[in-house]
Image: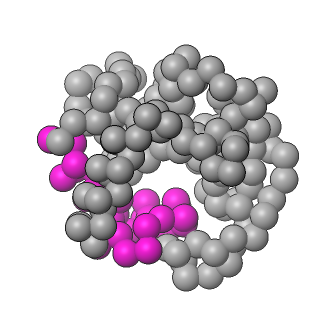
Amino acid sequence: MAKVALRPVEDSDLDALFDQMRDPESVRMAAFIARDPEDREAFDAHMAKLRASQDIVLRAVTGDGLFLGTVGSFVVEGDAEVTYWIDRSAWGRGIATQALALLLDIVKVRPLYARAASDNLGSLRVLQKAGFTIIGTENSYAAARDAEIEETVLRLG
């Protein structure tokens, strides 16, 4: 298993992250994505905003020193939530589980929420291993699928 670590997102990570966030299978599974994953200008503007915000925790996920994705926490309507994006080539290797555990050591706010497409069983497993419990579902528009889908809402603490 790779030695997973977190560090600040660097400019040199952005090309790889942009590519990861355009992978068709990753986009389908994430479901709730940018309106146009091919729009590099919008991606760069969004990442600049995230990286500059004092209210957002955003970390690069590395495995054995290699950039594998991101993990973070942000606030929506007063609720702190977590999010992560791991390169598809690293799925199924415990990378997301380790990265989320490391993030939870940094982000002490509780309760903490998470959301995942209800058919994204891998992501739901990662969240539940971290101690999140399912508290409900909602139907929401998923840009990646151009449809309303069921989204599972989870809570930690």
In what quadrant of the picture does the N terminus appear?
top left
Foreground residue among 155 and 86: 155
In the rendered structure, the answer to whether residue 23 lies left or right of residue 101 reads left
The span shown in magenta is 12-38
In the rendered structure, the answer to whether residue 79 lies left or right of residue 38 reads right
Reply above or below: 102 against 84.
above
Residue 62 in view: no
User: Which residue is drawn at the image coordinates 34% and 41% (left, top)?
Assistant: 52
Q: Residue 18 location, x and y as percent? A: 27, 57
Which of the 4 quarters of the picture holds residue 132?
A: top right
In the rendered structure, the answer to whether residue 126 lies left or right of residue 103 reads right
In the rendered structure, the answer to whether residue 138 lies left or right of residue 51 reads right
Reply above or below: 143 against 103.
below
Reply above or below: 108 against 9.
above
In what quadrant of the picture does the C terminus appear?
top right
Foreground residue among 57 and 68: 57
User: Which residue is drawn at the image coordinates 62% and 20% (left, top)?
Assistant: 108
Farthest residue in the left direction? 12
Reply above or below: 75 against 118.
above
User: Which residue is drawn at the image coordinates 52% and 60% (left, top)?
Assistant: 30
Q: Residue 41 location, x and y as percent? A: 23, 67
Foreground residue among 8 and 100: 8
